[in-house]
Image: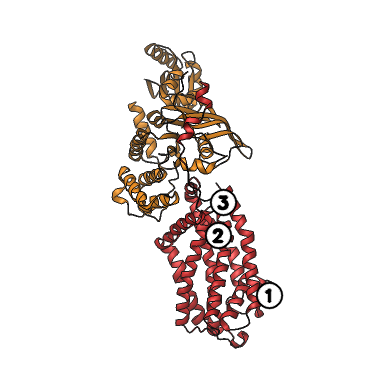
Amino acid sequence: MTAVTTDPGPAAVLAPEVDRPHALGDSLVIAWRNLVNIRRNPQLLVFATIQPVIFILNFRYVFGGAINAQALGGVSYVNYLMPGIFVQTVVFGALTTAVGLAGDLHLGIIERFKALPIARSAVLTGRTNADLIRNFGVMILMCVVGFAVGWTIDSDVWGLVGAILLILAFSYSLSWIFAFVGLSVKDPETAQAASFPILAPLIFASSAFIPVQTMPGWLQVWAKHQPVSVVCNAARDLTLGLPAASNTLKALAWIVGIVAVFAPLAVRKYRKVT
Amino acid sequence: MTAGPPIAIRAEQLVKRFGDVTALGGVSFEVPVGRVLGLLGPNGAGKTTSVRILTTLLRPDGGHAEVLGIDVTADPHRVRGSIGLAGQAATVDENLTARENLKMVGRLTHMASAEIGRRGGDLLERFALADDADRVVRTFSGGMRRRLDLAAALMHQPPVLFLDEPTTGLDPQGRTELWAVIEDLVDTGVTVLLTTQYLEEADYLADYIVVVDHGRVIAEGTASELKTQLGSTVIEVALRDAADAPVAQERLGAIGPVAVDGKVLHISLPDGDGATAMLETVRALDDAKLEPATLALREPTLDDVFLELTGHVAEDPSANGDAAPAAGRRRRRRGA
């Protein structure tokens, strides 16, 4: 009797050896799965592609005429607008991170991943990497639309590349904030509802669409220094051929700071989440 | 005693608390290699919590759990390589096809591409999904999703399988199909821990049954042992009005222990003569001027065992939704 209940020996031999987890490989499989999901989900696809184009056309042709050109310091509104629209798009796009992760939790697919012998980081890095790839695709599309509606780069191609890389890095940092939000609320509808109050002051009280000088003084304090404005300003400096070092460094500080705070928070939440 | 088969799944005095609620208050059981253990209990009994601890999804607050001799808290990664988990949630990706779902699991478990294709094809064939292999899962029925979920759990050929309420919410046909699939699996030598609220499911699939309620093991044995141990021939009296139940219970108490479930009374006859007891029941009811709606003498089912052990009937999981399984269950019971 005791031999049966205390000796795990024979059974242990049956447990298969398991590969060490491949953090990168596992993350890529999850990223692939998330990208297929975007492609197969019309709502996500429209959100990612049509919506940014509508925003460009709307601000360029509907609201653009009402913006006082003098307030922009002699810059044409389309040139002022495009970096702002890029940033606005990745900020709204970060909602997908929250909704997607919350949906995975809600459907229980995270359980499947957690019960498999894969890298613990893969679900989160797979999600944030997929969002990075999606944002890259969206930005290429927006560049094409932007050039079609008269956007010009006053610096050189490196200014444009720098601006795009900076905005992508910012989008990556936002993915970690919204990964944390998605894991905290656990269902997609709540994720959407919870995300909007975070997004709205970031987007609307910023320099994305208009210069902040026309805002009331108390709001300017926030609007000048919050990350969306800082990234917009840096991207603008880079594409308009202005001295960009100061705003770019400020933007990078925000990006690093956000990842440093929210990546560990999201990872901790992921470990605990059931 | 001679050494039996080695133990594949072992739970020793597992304790888990969620705030003030004790989900598991010291649960122990073991499953020898190649056997099927049925963990039977109502909602909230601690079945899923036990499975979640054994599958490394949850850390226990006390006790010890191992799979194939590997401690689940000490080496969860190795345990994950040995287990498959399929459950009530049917955790498949809605926007991938059936084949892509299996491919994803194959890639995540580092199977070779050729092996992924071959094994995926085999599983789809075996679970009658081959014709729908390249359709997006969103369009699948509940039963198809469960079968795919099970296929995904088996992709990396785990020797130990956890099935957490695999048929909850399925219609009777879907359940019967899934049962057949699980039976085939067991024939291949896989060790299975099955949780269920369906008594007949445990009866049908499991070699050994552990009954849990409120985080404790309240009985265990083979289905027939449980029936002999506790159940006995039963007289079932359905009254017309639940208000009469207390009076009837008092009057019928002389015949045998009476359990009440709404307007239905179950009298257990430990060793009695069914015909005599039936007569006594009729007389007692007549004396009390109670006229039953139905009166039946029948062999014990696991439902009776459960009622006797826990003092309440096994909750019907379909009560909060689909009524089809309940209907199927009643139909089958009558036939039993």
Q: Where is residue B70 drawn, in percent x and y?
A: 52, 36
Residue that label 2 marks: A193
Q: Position of residue B320 (x, y in %)?
A: 46, 41
Contact, CB < 8 Å: mark 3 with mark 2?
no
Q: Earlier in the sequence, mark 3 or mark 1?
A: 1
The answer to which of B228 and A274 lies nearer the viewer is A274
Give how far apart the Cα atoms at labels 2 and 1 are. 26 Å
In the rendered picture, chain A carries what hue? red
Near-viewer residue (B185 or B118): B118
Could you say whether the residue bearing mark 2 is in a helix, strand or loop? helix
Same chain under badges 3 and 2? The reply is yes
Whole-percent x and y of residue B292? Answer: 40, 22
Q: Chain of mark 1?
A: A
Q: Quadrant of residue B296?
A: top left
Mark 2 vs mark 1: which is more N-terminal? 2
**Front disc: 3 or 1:** 3
- Who's orange, chain-wise? B
Front tag of 3 and 2: 3
Tell which subunit mark 3 falls on: A
For residue A88, above or below residue B63: below
Residue type at tag 3: Tyr
* Circle 3 crowding by C-alpha within 10 Å: few under 14, some 14–19, many from 20: many
Residue assigned mark 3: A270
Residue B264 vs residue B320, the one in the foreground:
B320
Q: Residue at x 55, y 84 (%)?
A: A155
Q: Which residue is mark 1?
A: A220
User: What is the crowding at mark 1: few (fewer than 14 residues within 10 Å), some, or many (at least 20)?
Assistant: some
- What residue is at 55 percent from the left and 59 percent from the top? A193
Vertical arrangement, residue B319 with respect to residue B299, above or below:
below
* Residue A119, horizontal then vertical, whole percent: 52, 51
